[in-house]
Image: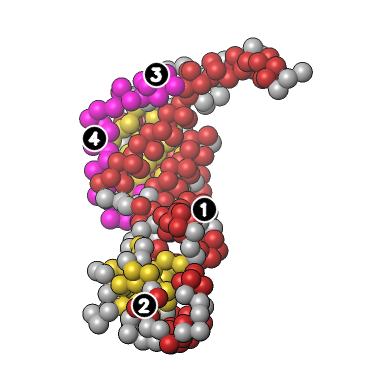
């Protein structure tokens, strides 16, 4: 039996048919949600943006799981946020919410009993409340400063009971809020790296400046010095190269192990650095991503790259630095 045959058979299975139906219904829900956005969403974003404290996100059951993800997304994109369990809030955790905060409360029915105390707390202390619900006339929608009402669409569950399409819409609506707040703040890739120092994402956003060697670690000589001094500097700094700088401190050349092999002879130590160096060496700026440095190192088949700013060497990055940091 070929590899393609079982795959083809699976395409006709009832499970695949059911899964496609679920995804189609949820896609329809997202389309309806996008079409429904208007004044309420336009009011919710600046309301949340104006909060001087954190954005508190809360919900019960499946809505609670979605609320946790929304809080995590907000926090990872530069907006301090925290999930507060509504039932726990009624038993002491309400103290986590301050008057400087704003609250996003999720409830598809809008009548979740566990949210009642939290809603009352925000009303008592004038804390901005954004409600995310599936019912326009619900308690949550009526009490919220801004009600984000989900469009009426069928749940993907064939019984119409398990939260499926509704939670997908809530999740997407939370993403939309987070991205709008991110764009308002002018959040950059550099900011993103600060909040994602670990994992593949953090490694992808590392800059050359994060990895480079600087200061006394830089191997540098002037072009008029004898090669004997250049070799001593290369050996002392252990990068397999030495940068050549002019009187103004600008990088004008480099001497590598390869240059030494090409000029090997009895008179090598007596030659000047200028006669051996490779002129106009390839360099990189400190703000460049470490992934770009690794690409250049691999393309040129070299192990070190000088980091230059305003024409002057400010650092050196070695291929081993990139590999140790997990840059690939």
Residue 17 percent location from the top left of the image: 59, 14
For marks 3 and 4, the one nearer the N-term is 4
Mark toward the viewer: 1 or 2: 2
The image shows residue 105, relative to residue 274, as above or below, that is above
Please give the residue where the numbered disc 1 appears in the rendered image: 328
Element type where label 4 sits in the image: helix
Q: How far apart are marks 2 and 3 (CA)?
A: 78 Å
CA gap between label 3 and label 4 equals: 20 Å
The part of the image, by quadrant, that contains residue 278 is bottom left
Q: Is residue 318 placed above or below 124 in the rendered structure?
A: below
Residue 322, image x and y in percent? 50, 62
- What quarter of the picture does the N terminus occupy? top right
Residue 96 shows in this picture? no
- Which quadrant of the figure has residue 279? bottom left
Which of the numbered marks, if any, corresponds to residue 42? 4
Mark 2 lies on a secondary structure that is helix
Q: Distance between the residues labelled 1 and 4?
A: 40 Å
Question: For the residue labelled by badge 3, is the local secondary structure a helix, a strand or a loop?
Answer: loop
Q: Which of marks 2 and 3 is nearer the N terminus?
A: 3
Q: Which residue is tagged 3?
A: 152
Residue where numbered disc 2 is placed = 275
Q: Nearer the viewer, residue 169 or 93?
A: 169
Q: Which x, y percent locates residue 15?
A: 64, 17
- Magenta segment includes 39: yes
Relative vertical location of residue 221 with respect to residue 31 in this rendering, above or below: below
């Amino acid at each position: 039996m070929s590899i393609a045959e079982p795959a083809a058979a699976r395409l006709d299975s009832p499970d695949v048919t059911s899964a496609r139906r679920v995804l189609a219904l949820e896609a329809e829900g997202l389309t309806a949600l996008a079409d429904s956005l208007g004044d309420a969403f336009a009011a919710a974003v600046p309301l949340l943006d104006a909060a001087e404290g954190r954005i508190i996100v809360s919900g019960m059951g499946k809505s609670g799981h979605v609320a946790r993800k929304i809080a995590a997304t907000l926090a990872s994109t530069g907006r301090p946020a925290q999930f507060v369990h509504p039932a726990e809030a009624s038993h002491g955790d309400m103290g986590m919410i301050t008057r400087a905060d704003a609250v996003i409360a999720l409830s598809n029915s809008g009548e979740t009993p566990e949210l009642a105390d939290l809603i009352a707390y925000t009303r008592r202390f004038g804390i901005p409340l954004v409600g995310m619900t599936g019912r326009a006339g619900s308690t949550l929608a009526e009490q919220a400063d801004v009600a984000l009402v989900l469009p009426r669409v069928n749940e993907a569950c064939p019984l119409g009971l398990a939260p499926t399409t509704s939670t997908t819409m809530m999740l997407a609506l939370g993403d939309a809020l987070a991205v709008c707040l991110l764009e308002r703040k002018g959040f950059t890739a550099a900011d993103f790296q600060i909040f994602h120092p670990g994992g593949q994402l953090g490694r992808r956003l590392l800059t050359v400046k994060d990895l480079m060697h600087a200061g006394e670690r830089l191997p540098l000589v002037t072009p008029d010095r004898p090669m004997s001094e250049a070799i001593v500097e290369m050996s002392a700094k252990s990068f397999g190269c030495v940068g050549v700088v002019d009187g103004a401190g600008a990088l004008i050349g480099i001497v590598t192990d390869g240059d030494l092999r090409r000029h090997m002879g009895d008179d090598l130590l007596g030659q000047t650095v200028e006669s051996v160096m490779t002129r106009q060496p390839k360099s990189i700026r400190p703000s460049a991503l470490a992934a770009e440095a690794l690409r250049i190192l691999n393309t040129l088949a070299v192990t070190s790259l000088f980091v230059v700013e305003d024409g002057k060497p400010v650092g050196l990055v070695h291929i081993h630095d990139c590999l140790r940091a997990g840059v690939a």
